[in-house]
Structure formats: structure tokens, C-alpha cells
Image (cartoon, rainbow, N blue to C red):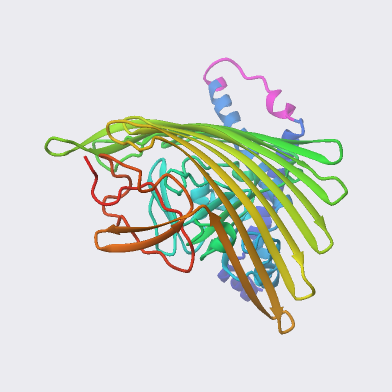
Amino acid sequence: MNDGKNQHLERGRDPFRLSEMVQRRESRACLADNFIEGNSNMLFNHNYKNGPAMGAGRILLASFLAVCLTATTEAQTSRSVRDVTAMSMEDLMNMQVTSVSKRTQKVADAAAAIFVITQEDIRRSGATSIPEALRLAPGLEVARIDQNKWAIGSRGFNGRFDDKLLVLIDGRSVYTPLFSGVYWNVQDVMLEDVERIEVIRGPGATLWGANAVDGVIDVITKKAKSTQSAIVTAGAGTEERAAGGARYGGKLGDNTHYRAYTKYFDWGPSAYPYPSGMTAHDGWDALRGGFRADWTPAGANSLTLQGDIYRSRFDETLTVASLSPPYSNTFPNDGKYSGGNLLGRWNHTSEGSSMSLQMYYDNTTITDHSLFGDHQNILDIDFQHGFHAGDSQQFVWGLGYRSIRDKNDPSFTVSLQPNQVTLNQFSTFLQDEISLVDNRLQITLGSKSLEPHSKSIDLDRGITRGTDSGPNRRGPEAKFSGYTPGDPFEPRAIPSGGGSIREPSVQLRGPPRV
């Protein structure tokens, strides 16, 4: 008996302690369920007397409510999300993904180095933002520059202005045409509504376009039907001074489900480990809200409509060029982001075939005081059709159109010429998967075309780079002055390969011009 118990203890599985933990968790979950369902009289029917005891009682009550809400979230999640740690290797390989070939397939059949971050992984990690959740993926380099800036890259290429990684949220590309990268401090969702995050390490340009040289990150949220409940989150701390969110889901009839959410956080400045208590000038706060509605009739069609609106304010410290010694100035600065997006998607499935049409509009306004202002309007239309050609072939083809209107407010430090441009891009892609040897060997052939495109060669510090790219803000007519973004030790030009095309970025070529 003792030997058996010792074996359990060596494995970290004390049966007596596990039983006690399960009983405690069940009691907390039941108490929290009673509170959510409206049986909260037991919490509020106590008569507190005036005096210090009343204040202590309120503090105790607030702490108790926080514990109850946490337990409720855990209880609800544990009921709706499958524990991946309890899944067998066969079940893990049978997980469904869509980012590799733009169709649903098993992880075992995906011809790519793919890693899936599940909702259970996110919940257990304690992550409060998408970049923090991406730290769970092997092969991704996730670095936090300060409170409101991130540098995320794959395959060894990492930097704040990395332009070789495509990021999608529910099929919507979130790269900015300003430098063909991602403003990570703008991208946010209600993490409790994320179904999974698919991370592909490797080229994917034949399907996803010019930015998918080093990989693809696809954040996929749950369908509205899976979020038919109310959730409230709250937190506070020293640097993360306040954070909270709320989401409510419901339905209209039998075929239409919806959800709406709001989220807010306030990060204070980073604290340096100095006795003086000096802090960095990098505070950050943001408020956002959004919705999703799914119409799923009994037929072969489905319709999704979703949107977000946000505003964010941030602080930073800048170093800019100067005309007088020491030829640079360092000073505190602030700015803000604001904008919104609206997406509509139609899906049609039939035996052996599927079609989808997606349209979205995105508006972003960036005001970086002392540097520049930028106003972006993006319209994107994407059509995709997949079908079987016999028992051994699967075709996927599609058409795309993207219109970008970008207007820049120049300053003495940064100026783009021309300060207003309209860029139009047409794209087509085709991919064929051929199964051989009783479906144990597959050959994948694919191609993607972007029009219009331009061929340019950059000569910078002895590095020669050829770039076949789509239209964006950087071109031979763009002129800059005075400000060098990103790490001053980061190379201005990095050779890229892998047989993929890549979008260029708005960065200085060589030393800053004054």
C-alpha cells in the first residue's frame, strides 16, 4: 500500500490530495454557478454594521466575488473546451486546421511545420494579449520592447518592423501598408473567444501572398453559437493598473447567433530596477469593442458579419536627428491609434465542393506626435473555390482585390512624398494537391500572381537584394528625412529566399537624410 502511494507521489499524483482538490473545485464551481444564475442573496443579505468592520466586509466581499468569477470562468471553460493534455497522439494529429491549404484538414495531413495554440493553452498560460499567447509557439521569437511595442518574427528574423510574417484575424489580414508589417499594439481580441491560433513556420506565399515568407499566424475566434453566455473579467496590479472585459452572447431565432464584447486596459510605465524608482515613459491604455453574428440555416449557405472599433493611447521615448551637435535629440513623446473594421463572409458547401466570398473594410488613424500622422483606408475582396477532381486530386483557386488609400501628415522629422497615394492590387492563386501511393504520398503544386507589381533592386551597405513585390508606400518616389525607425543596429536590408515574393516596407535605405 505504501509502495503504491509512493509511486503516485513520485509521479506527482497523490490520490488523497487530488480528491481534495477536486472537491474544492467542484464546490467553488457550484457556488459560482449559483451566483451567475441569480442566487446571489446569500452574498448580499448580510447586515453589516457601521464602522471599520463594514469596510473590511466590503473588501472581503470584493475578494470573494473575484474568486467566484474566476471559478466560474474555469468551470465554464472546462465544460466547453477539451483538455488537450488528456488527448492521445492520434487525437492530437487529427486536430483540424485551415491555414495550411485554405481548407479544413488534419494536422497529420498538413504539409507544413504547424503548431496550434488552443483555448485551453491560452487560459492556462495567463496571457492577456495576442503577443503573450504567441510565446507558447515554438519557433517564434517574441520580444517585448517596452509596454506598448513588440517584435515578433520567425526563422531568426525578428524586429519591430518585421515584414516577412503574415498575420490574420478570422481571415482578415492585419498588416499595415505603411511598412508591410504589423502594429501589434493595435491587434487585440477577447482572448476568451479565441478558438485557436495556428502558427505556420515556413513560406506560404503561394496561397497567402507576399508577406508570408517566413510564416503565417492565423487567429481564429469561436463561432457565435459557441459563445452563448455572459463573461466578465477584471484585474489590477502595479504595472497593469486596470484591466477588464465583458462579453454577452445570444440568438435571434433558431439560425442566427450573435455576441458583443468590450475590453479595456491601462498599463502604467515600466519600472526600472533602480533605487531611485525611476520609470520609463511607455504607458499604454486602450478601449475596444466588437461584435459577431452568424446566420447558419439548414441549407448549404452560411453568412458571418463581424466588426471592431478601438482607440489606444501610448507613450514613448524618441531619438531623432538634429542639425546641431550632438546631432540627435532624445525626448518623451506620445501618440494614439484609432480605427475600426467590418467584415462579411459568405460560405457555400456542397458535396465535393466549397465556395467562399469575403469582403472587409478597415480604417486606421495613427497620430504619433512629433513624428507623423497616417490615415489608412483598406478595402479587400477575396473569392475562393475548392473542389475534388477525381479521387486523387483537390484543387483550390481564388481571386483577390485590395485597394489601399494612404494619406500622411508630414512633419519636420518625417515626410513621405507624395503624401497621399492610392494603391490597387489584383491577385490570383491556384493550388493542386495530388495523392499518390494509396494517399500516403502527396504532391502539392501552387502558384500566386500579384498585379501590378514592380521589380526593384536595393543597394545598401554592400548588400544587394532583389524584391518582387506588390504596391505599397515604399517606392523610388518616396523620400524620408531625419528619423530612423526601429533598432539602430538592425541591418537595413536582409536577403530573403525560399522562392517567395515579399512586400517591401517604408524604411530608410541607408543613413537618415537631413
Which residues are the magenta region?
40-54
Horizontal side, residue 106 vs residue 449: left or right: right
Horizontal side, residue 465 vs residue 165: left or right: left
Horizontal side, residue 420 vs residue 79: left or right: left
x 76%, y 44%: residue: 303
Q: Which residue is nearer to you in this view: 361 or 286?
A: 361
In x, y percent, where is residue 411? 31, 30
Q: In the picture, residue 495 is in which quadrant?
A: bottom left
The residue most toward the left is 325
166 drawn magenta: no
x 31%, y 42%: residue: 479
The residue most toward the bottom is 437
State the quadrant of the C terminus: top left
Q: Which residue is nearer to you in this view: 424 or 96?
A: 424
In x, y percent, where is residue 481? 27, 39
In x, y percent, where is residue 317? 30, 37
